[in-house]
Amino acid sequence: MKTYGSQSMIAPVKRMLLKHPREAFKDQANVDRQWEGLHYVGRPDFESALNEYARFADLLGQFGMEIHYLPREEATSLDSIYTHDPVIMANGGAVLGNMGKAAREPEPVAAGEYLEEIGVPVLGRIMGIGRMEGGDVLWIDERTVAVGQGYRTNADGIRQLKELLGNSVDEVIPVPMPHWTGPDDCLHLMSFISIVDTDLAVVYSRLMPVPFRQWLLERGFQLVEVPDQEYDSFGCNVLAVAPRQCLMLSGNPVTQQRLEAAGAKVWTFGGSEIALKGTGGPTCLTRPILRT
């Protein structure tokens, strides 16, 4: 029986890796020490974060997936709550990233050690000058993966990922990223696109490279456009737990309505403390380790 592997953004999630704010944030004093240096847009409130996360975890639990929680690690920061970034999952196992944000450098090793403990093999790690964060890796289908090339993921990281994936993929497509608000902020490929079915994606087109957007349209994707007023509230960051079964942050009614009009079922949760202040949405908070 298969217990790991994922080369999809939409296949039903069977196993999920999370990190609870109790282990990532630790306590309010730790939050107070770190949040400004990590370029958070506001100071998270620890107790409110615990309450928000309870609602989020309950939502995930209703889909019947097996949930694993990363343990506390003293070397990691508040950002370790965003379990999507230090690991890229493939059918053959995990690829450990090499973080473009210096404060997150300890995360891939910590995640890799835990994954091996729960039976998920590590295929390899992005090394040396290569940089790779999971938020830049977007599976278009099982054999096609697009990778954002910008401040968090570079050309050498993409080259190494292609080598590690080997013949499990046909295409690794680099997508040039815009400067946007600069290297200190977090802009991943999935900052402006979430795939929620084989032919449906939520996008903020103003940030999309024209060739990539045209390529998606040529492949038959319907694009659900996020309005300007819902970009900063993470209208673009939508987690598909199964085809057209989506979790997103509350406060994005236009995007939600457009998704539902396209036939999607949407569940929402409040994420001021665990998502918005650290600029990471529901996709960032999760690392599926088995989708089938």
Image (spheres, rainbow, N blue to C red):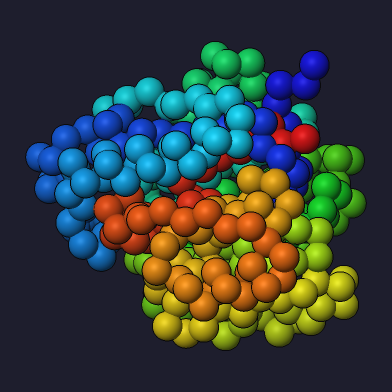
Quarter of the image for residue 4 reads top right
Return the x and y of residue 238 as percentages of the image width and height: 56, 59
Q: Does 121 sit above or below residue 239?
A: above
Residue 211 in view: yes
Query: Considering depth in this image, is 10 or 30 the residue closer to the camera?
Result: 10
Q: Does 213 sit above or below residue 129?
A: below
Return the x and y of residue 131 as percentages of the image width and height: 55, 51
Q: Does 269 sit above or below residue 30?
A: below
Return the x and y of residue 256 as percentages of the image width and height: 55, 69
43 relative to 55 in the view: left or right: left
Which residue is rendered at x = 51% and y = 78% of the image? Answer: 254
Quarter of the image for residue 144 reads bottom right
Which quadrant is the C terminus positioned in? top right
271 relative to 200 in the view: left or right: left
174 relative to 276 in the view: left or right: right
Return the x and y of residue 67 as percentages of the image width and height: 53, 27
Which residue is rendered at x = 22% and y = 33% of the image? Answer: 26
270 relative to 203 in the view: left or right: left
Which residue is rendered at x = 70% and y = 46% of the image? Answer: 242
Which quadrant is the N terminus positioned in? top right
Query: Considering depth in this image, is 149 or 188 the residue closer to the camera?
Result: 188
Query: Considering depth in this image, is 38 or 66 the residue closer to the camera?
Result: 66
Which residue is rendered at x = 58% and y = 25% of the image? Answer: 66
Q: How many marks?
A: 0
